[in-house]
Image: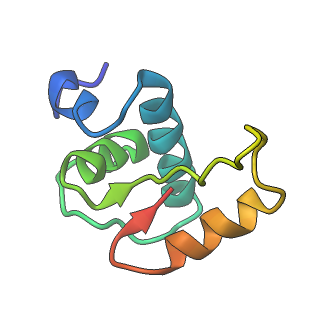
Amino acid sequence: MLLYPPIDEIKKKADSRYTLVIMAAKRARDLVAEKPALVEIDNNVPISIAAEEIVGGEITYSRPPKAQNGDAPADADAAAAQAGAAGQGARI
């Protein structure tokens, strides 16, 4: 069970619980794949590190813009990857 950071703090960083779960899961997988942690904490559990990074603002997310007819853009994955390449921290 995740005790710190408090879930109320984490929920402020995403527009939905689903988004929050996806952010934490993707980042935890990155940490398991031996990508460097963006924060220093005493815990070495990947999901705890991911939660700390989310609360600290090191991990963010963005949504691809919607097409005018309501369909998702054809190259949404490329747009998301390009958006994540710019800036500091990690963008999921």
Would residue 86 be found to the left or right of residue 7 on screen?
Answer: right
Q: How many numbered marks, from 0 up?
A: 0
Image quadrant in which you'd find residue 48: top left
Identified at 77% across, 41% down, the residue is 69
- In terms of depth relative to the viewer, which is nearer, 4 or 17? 17
| x and y percentages locating residue 31 in the rendered image | 48, 58
Image quadrant in which you'd find residue 9: top left
- In terms of depth relative to the viewer, which is nearer, 84 or 40? 84
- In terms of depth relative to the viewer, which is nearer, 61 or 44? 61
Would residue 85 be found to the left or right of residue 20 on screen?
Answer: right
Identified at 45% across, 62% down, the residue is 91
Identified at 63% across, 69% down, the residue is 81
Whether residue 60 is situated above or below residue 11 in the rendered picture? below
| x and y percentages locating residue 20 in the rendered image | 42, 33
Which quadrant of the rendered structure holds the N terminus? top left
Whether residue 67 is situated above or below residue 24 in the rendered picture? below
Identified at 31% across, 49% down, the residue is 49
Image quadrant in which you'd find residue 38: bottom left
| x and y percentages locating residue 13 in the rendered image | 27, 40
Would residue 44 be found to the left or right of residue 6 on screen?
Answer: right
